[in-house]
């Protein structure tokens, strides 16, 4: 070892004789630490074994004694109006915490979790209680240790330092290692309240234990700080914080799996390669290395890579030589992987090997390396023992499924539902709500994406899935019953959406299909709030039209949904009311037309909505009077007034003159026709006015206006367009019969309109040139 | 340094670092693989620094360990990576430390022939005496095998496949037949210590075209650009100072100028800046390239203005580097200056940004 790394004078770390508190600092998920913990508990035979884990789980410790199949995790959640948070404390066969529990029960000690509940604000946003701490200082110290030992990466350092350490030396090495990361347990403000809480438990246990010892198992990061703080604590048992008022919190066991436990694939996990370390724990480093060679060779062959016997010989030799060169007692994980990299991979890499750096495997990693790491991850999945305490949500779901005759079975079945049948509707609500919770084994094979006024038909596929229980336990963070949980999840999604109406529309659809759109939950308010936040008038219009349509005709979604939809309509109405006057951009104006149409429908056809009719009409009037208003908005405003029977006060033809420039008229008419097509079609004065305007234009002006005009008249169905043609032809002096024939021809033009326009443009140029040359 | 080497522009590693090697040899107590001049530990110290030796290269220790172990076993070593990642230098250092001779080098290229690898003939002698050991001119592979030394094969993927494949039987059987000669001279058996270090760069004709049989006889090691920014900066500083001293420039560019240079190279290489993701250049932005830009900046400053080089000099030199392979890169570089560099504070960054108009192809 190089100087400067361990140059501080040796500190007396061994507990003084007679000191009754034994704090064992471990690295979570370390087999060596697990062994150490078991030996220590057997040696000290303490009265209490305190373990870093959620103290609110203590009343349910017996759950952990059942005959589970590891790995599993304590899942903790906390939900309030403002935040929903979940955290895991995972255990596998070689977890020091798990060994501590087992050993405590074996020697008759009382095991207790002594850390803050995961939902406590001071716990922070940690998703995994047993993830390694990632302080900046610690990283520097770790890099220094790695440099001194000549190892590459934190995991390699750990294996060299701890996993291969002789049993009698391990404790001393760990103390020095953790002291190096955090000298003398110096204060860490982020962890202080957790450490205080654990230390207070220790002090209390010491008092309770009288003359017997107390063992405390915690992350090595905390060990020295807890020793120090325990001496300062008063010996009172710290009260486990309880959630207040409308907060919900809980901790339940869930099955876990090695993939989630692995640092390379899971998130915020601790040690990598769980299947390998399981072998290390069960059979030792040598046997684990042999196992790993077999597992990797098999995995690579399965992935289609050639691993010949000669390759395996070269690999094995290389690994042994590396272990010798690095002074390892036997082939460690880094030796195996490094040797495999050197001997089996015949390509250049795009980035350094994943095991020499922190974090998950990155995109672009060589497939052979991915296969190797996956082989060491393993596929073990945990299973809970029967009789394990379960959250109320699971029971609620089971009852609902049983009542609906939908209890999943090993054999997959297809369920076809027709919303016209009341019983099917109920079942559809249940299945759609479960789909929202992400229940594995349930798939919606067919069904409309967006709700329509017609009764939907849906097809689901349902099968019993091994992950279903775990997923639903984890979904209990959202609520105690299926509707509660699904609605809370949707409201959260709606709240996250901000003003993104695409997501909000999906939420609305999901809510309707799952029968969750009722006024009692937050969801409707959340969606309404999203609409208020949105700036996209086009999307608001689309959402508004859907809402008003469903409000009027969507009785299939129930009376409660109708009320909630009414509330959404009101939100859209308010939004349009607020923004109508501020649209001055032509494009934006055209996009806003559907929003006006939605409002028109509400004004005209929904008398039971609580909307400010007079204010809206006044706003429209102001839009019309303002010369800055985008032409499409002005047209839409006028159209709305006309459609609501308020047009009498306005001279439509006169208003049109204000927007009669060739680049404006088309947009204005688009707005007008979109909103009041029927009324305008009957009003020949308007058509006459348009005709008169166009007659006054040059060909150039007409060509400028043509695309927008065509778009405007597209709002009329063909039959009405033909009728309008007749009116125009008659006005130009054609007889009734001529007009009829000509109009019919106009509707069935053989040449494409764009070609005609091009011809017109060419003619105009020719005429101008002739005129310039004085030939006309 | 001995007098006679002063005139040599660039002495080979075993001469340049003779004293370090001697010292390591004296103190080295570790077990040595057969034919090796040093133990694995001492070789590693020689390359990465330690045990009294200076650090010559920034690389992951695991890479050096794997490379040494490969050379000590029956497979040859192939170093691959982007240009300018010190592959050749690493192979030189390893050859100097292991066999005390880094000069047995075959330079790969399109015109390489078998006799430049194995052996050729002194034709005057051949005609007058017929084939004999005296008439044979040993090429690096012949010498390496008979003396038990490391043979370096630079840019192996640039030579024709059939020439590459002459290595096949030599690497597996460790014997080279000289059919023209009879008796002992007809078979050259490799002595302990012989092995091959080849280098290949990922920008040229790739290793994909190597025959599977030859690939099997090599262990591949990818050499990456330096991971740590501070280490790269220190290296650029050190190497640029050396080069500048040799060019007669007394002072290296200021630290903040070099920091701008190295940061800029790293960001353009990785496509990742302090402000977030960006486009990476397809041109090679290697550490070696950064050193040569730093060198050029120093030379410009000293000989053209009499100062130590300014940030705007970087721009002038960058255009040549970045637009070497791809004209598109110049556009990307311009975007980088406009969008990322414009937001940075600090004198050097500001000057760097202000000189962006100098960026012309």
Image: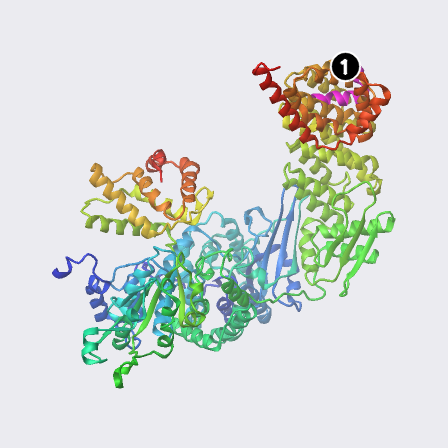
Residue at which label 1 appears = A650
Q: What residue lies at 64% left-to-right and 38% top-to-bottom?
A: A500
Q: Position of residue A725 (x, y in %)?
A: 79, 24
Residue A2 visible in the current orientation? no
Quadrant housing residue B197? bottom left
Q: Is residue B291 above or below residue A219?
A: above
Question: Residue B267: horizontal and vertical position, in percent?
Answer: 41, 46
Of A260 and A40, the residue lying toward us: A260
Quadrant into which the N terminus of chain A falls: bottom left
Depth check, front residue: A91 or B70: B70
Residue at 26% of width from left, 85% of height from top?
A: B184
- Magenta stretch holds residue A638: yes
Residue placed most toward the observer, A360 or A547: A547
On-image quarter of the C terminus of chain A: top right
Prevailing secondary structure class for the magenta stretch in the rendered image: helix
Closer to the camera, A339 or A659? A659
Question: Which contiguous range is marked in magenta?
Answer: A634-653
Identity of the residue furthest to the bottom in this view: B183
Q: Is residue A770 magenta?
A: no
Q: Is residue B349 left or right of residue A419?
A: left
* Looking at the image, residue A16 lies above or below residue A397: below
Q: Is residue A48 visible?
A: yes
Q: Quadrant of residue A518?
A: top right
| Image position, residue A4 (x, y; %) | 31, 58
Q: Residues within 10 Å of mark 1 (few under 14, many from 20)?
A: some
């Amino acid at each position: 070892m190089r100087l400067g790394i361990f140059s501080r004078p040796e500190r007396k770390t061994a507990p003084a004789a007679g000191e009754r508190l034994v704090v064992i600092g471990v690295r979570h998920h370390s087999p060596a630490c697990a062994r150490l913990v078991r030996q220590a508990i057997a040696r000290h035979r303490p009265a209490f074994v305190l373990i870093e884990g959620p103290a609110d789980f203590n009343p349910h410790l017996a759950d952990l004694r059942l005959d589970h199949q590891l790995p599993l995790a304590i899942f903790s959640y906390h939900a309030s109006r403002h935040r929903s948070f979940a955290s895991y404390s995972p255990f596998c066969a070689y977890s020091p915490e798990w060994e501590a529990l087992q050993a405590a029960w074996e020697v008759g000690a009382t095991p207790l979790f002594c850390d803050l509940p995961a939902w406590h604000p001071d716990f922070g946003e940690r998703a995994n209680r047993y993830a390694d701490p990632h302080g900046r200082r610690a990283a520097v110290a770790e890099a220094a240790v790695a440099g001194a030992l000549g190892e590459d990466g934190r995991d390699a350092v750990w294996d060299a330092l701890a996993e291969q350490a002789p049993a009698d030396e391990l404790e001393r090495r760990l103390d020095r290692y953790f002291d190096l990361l955090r000298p003398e347990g110096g204060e860490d403000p982020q962890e202080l309240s957790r450490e205080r809480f654990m230390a207070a438990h220790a002090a209390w246990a010491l008092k309770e234990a009288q003359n017997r010892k107390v063992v405390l198992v915690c992350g090595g990061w905390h060990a020295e700080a807890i020793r120090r703080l325990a001496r300062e604590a008063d010996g009172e048992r710290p009260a486990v914080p309880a959630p207040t008022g409308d907060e919900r919190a809980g901790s339940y066991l869930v099955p876990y799996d090695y993939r989630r436990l692995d640092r390379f694939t899971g998130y915020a996990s601790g040690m990598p390669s769980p299947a390998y370390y399981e072998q290390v724990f069960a059979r030792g480093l040598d046997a684990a290395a042999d196992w790993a060679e077999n597992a990797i060779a098999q995995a690579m062959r399965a992935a289609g890579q050639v691993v010949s016997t000669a390759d395996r010989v070269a690999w094995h030799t290389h690994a042994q030589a590396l272990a010798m060169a690095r002074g390892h007692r036997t082939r460690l994980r880094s030796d195996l992987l490094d040797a495999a990299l050197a001997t089996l991979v015949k390509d250049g890499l795009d980035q350094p090997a994943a095991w020499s750096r922190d974090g998950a495997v990155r995109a672009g990693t060589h497939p052979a390396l991915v296969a190797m790491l996956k082989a060491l991850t393993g596929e073990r999945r945990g299973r809970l023992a029967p009789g394990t305490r379960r959250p109320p949500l699971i029971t609620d779901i089971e009852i609902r499924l049983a009542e609906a005759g939908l209890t999943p079975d090993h054999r997959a079945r297809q369920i076809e539902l027709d919303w016209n049948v009341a019983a099917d509707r109920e079942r559809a609500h249940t299945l759609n709500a479960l789909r929202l919770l992400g229940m594995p084994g349930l798939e919606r094979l067919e069904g409309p994406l967006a709700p329509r006024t017609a009764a939907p038909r849906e097809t689901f596929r349902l099968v019993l899935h091994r992950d279903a229980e775990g997923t639903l336990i984890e979904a209990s963070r959202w609520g105690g019953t299926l509707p509660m949980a699904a609605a809370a999840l949707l409201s959260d999604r709606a709240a996250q959406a901000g003003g993104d109406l695409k997501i909000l529309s999906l939420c609305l659809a999901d809510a309707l299909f799952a029968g969750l759109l009722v006024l009692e939950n937050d969801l409707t308010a959340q969606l309404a709030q999203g609409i208020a936040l949105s700036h996209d008038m086009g999307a608001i219009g689309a959402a508004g039209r859907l809402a008003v349509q469903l409000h009027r005709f969507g009785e299939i979604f129930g009376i409660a949904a109708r009320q909630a939809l009414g509330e959404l309509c009101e939100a859209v109405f308010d939004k349009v009311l607020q923004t109508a006057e501020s649209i001055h951009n032509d494009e934006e104006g055209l996009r806003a037309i559907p929003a006006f149409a939605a409002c028109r429908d509400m004004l005209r056809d929904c008398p039971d909505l609580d909307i400010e009719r007079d204010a809206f009409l006044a706003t429209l009037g102001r839009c019309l009077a303002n010369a800055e208003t985008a032409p499409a908005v002005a047209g839409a405003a006028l159209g709305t007034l006309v459609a609501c029977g308020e047009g009498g006060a306005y001279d439509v033809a006169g208003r049109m003159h204000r927007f009669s420039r060739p680049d404006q008229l088309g947009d204005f008419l688009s707005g007008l026709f979109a909103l009041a097509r029927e009324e305008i079609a009957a009003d020949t004065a308007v058509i006459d006015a348009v005709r008169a305007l166009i007659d006054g234009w040059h060909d150039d002006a007409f060509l400028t206006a043509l695309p927008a005009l065509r778009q405007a008249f597209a709002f009329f169905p063909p039959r009405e367009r033909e009728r309008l043609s007749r009116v125009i032809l008659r006005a130009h002096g054609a007889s009734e019969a001529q007009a009829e024939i000509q109009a019919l021809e106009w509707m069935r033009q053989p040449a494409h309109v764009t070609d005609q326009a091009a011809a017109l443009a060419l003619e105009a140029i020719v005429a101008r040139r002739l005129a310039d040359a004085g030939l006309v | 340094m001995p007098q006679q080497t002063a005139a040599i522009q660039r002495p080979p590693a075993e001469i340049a670092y003779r004293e370090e090697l001697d010292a390591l040899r004296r103190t080295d107590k570790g077990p040595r693989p057969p034919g090796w001049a040093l133990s694995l530990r001492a070789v590693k110290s020689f390359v990465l620094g330690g045990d009294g030796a200076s650090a010559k290269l920034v690389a992951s220790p695991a890479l050096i360990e794997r490379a040494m172990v490969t050379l000590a076993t029956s497979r040859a070593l192939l170093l691959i990576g982007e240009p300018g990642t010190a592959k050749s230098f690493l192979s030189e250092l390893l050859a100097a430390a292991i066999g005390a001779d880094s000069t047995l080098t075959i330079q790969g290229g399109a015109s390489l022939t078998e006799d430049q690898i194995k052996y050729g003939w002194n034709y005057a002698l051949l005609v007058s005496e017929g084939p004999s050991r005296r008439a044979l001119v040993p090429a690096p592979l012949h010498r390496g095998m008979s003396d038990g030394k490391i043979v370096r094969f630079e840019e192996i993927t640039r030579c024709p496949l059939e020439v590459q494949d002459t290595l096949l039987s030599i690497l597996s059987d460790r014997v080279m037949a000289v059919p023209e000669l009879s008796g002992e001279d007809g078979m050259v058996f490799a002595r302990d210590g012989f092995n091959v270090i080849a280098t290949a760069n990922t920008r040229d004709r790739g290793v994909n075209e190597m025959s599977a049989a030859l690939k099997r006889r090599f262990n591949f090691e990818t050499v990456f650009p330096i991971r740590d920014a501070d280490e790269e900066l220190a290296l650029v500083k050190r190497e640029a100072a050396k080069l500048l001293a040799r060019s007669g420039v007394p002072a290296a560019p200021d630290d903040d100028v070099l920091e701008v240079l190295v940061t800029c190279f790293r960001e353009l290489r990785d496509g990742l800046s302090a402000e977030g993701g960006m486009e990476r250049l397809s041109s090679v932005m290697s550490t070696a390239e950064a050193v040569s830009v730093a060198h050029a900046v120093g030379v410009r400053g000293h000989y053209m203005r009499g100062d130590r080089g300014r940030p705007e000099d970087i721009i002038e030199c960058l255009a040549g580097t970045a637009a070497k392979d791809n004209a598109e890169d110049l556009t990307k570089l311009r975007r980088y200056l406009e969008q990322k560099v414009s937001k940075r504070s600090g004198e050097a960054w500001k000057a760097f940004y202000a000189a962006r108009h100098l960026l012309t192809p």
